[in-house]
Amino acid sequence: MILTLLIPDLIWPEPADESTLANLPCPRLEQLLARGSLTRTPREPLELLLARLLGTGSATLAACRLEHEENSPSLNNQPAAWVCIDPVNLQFHHERIILGDASRLNIQAEEAQTLISALNQTFPDLGTFHAPHPERWYLAPAPGLELPELPPPSAATGRQLGSLLPEAPQFSRLMNEVQMLLHTHPVNRARESQRQPLINGLWFWGGQPVQASNPTPITRVCSTHSLARGLATSSGLQQQGAPAGLAELLPGEGAQHTLVVLDELLPHALIEDGDAWRQTLEQLEQQWFEPLLKGAGKHPAQLRLLSPCAFGLLEWRLDAASRWKFWRRPKPLASLAQELARPQI
């Protein structure tokens, strides 16, 4: 079996951050990386990487993600036209507006449906808004409506809003109108009174189809990530939820190439929470890296560690022979981060 572990932000994005990188408790990970062969290519957002690995055919990423939603609207009428319009929190940071961490909004189902009703009443010319999940919203656009493609959430969170928006005056006006509606809505007034972050923007993305270009086709996906699950459904792949560790990775019927998406580090890196990132890395060390190095009867024939991060798309490949390359001296993850941060010649 080929096993690919997709772990966004496996390398902390700030190489000079000693408080986060000093004495990291991950010796087994460092050994694995030392024994693998590293390939570095340009940075790729997690969502687009998933699409490239798993393929979407002619459907949009939004339509594929909808495949995983329990209460999704029918896809029969517009199988290729859906757009993600995820609710976000726009906040001031050093006198600039940035896209906040939407995962901390903790939106309730009643709040989502109330705001979706307001959007449908106010913007009927855009199409039909849906919220099959409180934190994952969609637009079935009206015929002929063209919307610019914004970066996916993993590439936008924490960044200045102005640097993310295209030069499109009509779209900018639409964004402002949406923000005004949401900002003044009673749902947000209630959230403000309870000191909860406001749902004061929508993020339009996922309207483009992306074809697979993976040289070793994946046959099974193990993940709780909604887009990964939707892409797997759309592509007819075997699925299971993300196992808690290597010991819980089920064999899978005839699975030749298993992709496990471990995206727990990503939200901590996006909001620069170094303590939470360290704690999560330690859990991955115990649940995955140590068993992979020791074996635990689960050695895959080939192992890929794939990590989109601030330094590019990093890929380490290990095979059966790699495990015996014990003469390769491990580097602390802090040293590796500093090496990766140096300009490439």
Image: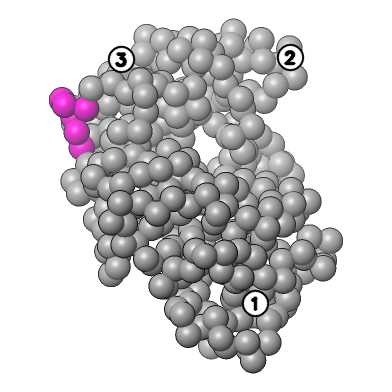
- Spatial CA span between label 2 and label 1: 47 Å
Which residue is located at x 38 percent, y 58 percent? 258
Mark 3 vs mark 1, foreground winner is: 1
In the image, taking residue 85 as reference, residue 99 lies left or right, namely: right
Mark 3 and mark 1 lie on one chain; the one further toward the N terminus is: 1
Residue range corresponding to the magenta coloring: 75-80
Q: Residues within 10 Å of mark 1 (few under 14, many from 20)?
A: many
Mark 2 vs mark 1, foreground winner is: 1
Could you tell me if residue 30 is visible in this image? yes
Q: Position of residue 309 (x, y in %)?
A: 56, 62
In the image, taking residue 9 as reference, residue 118 lies left or right, namely: left
Mark 2 and mark 1 lie on one chain; the one further toward the N terminus is: 1
Which residue is located at x 42 percent, y 73 percent? 302
Does 283 appear above or below 103?
A: below
Q: Label 1: which residue?
A: 31
User: For residue 338, what is the image quadrant?
Assistant: bottom right
In the image, taking residue 240 as reference, residue 282 lies left or right, namely: right
> For the residue labelled by badge 1, is the local secondary structure a helix, a strand or a loop?
helix
Foreground residue among 232 and 164: 232
> For the residue labelled by badge 2, is the local secondary structure a helix, a strand or a loop?
loop
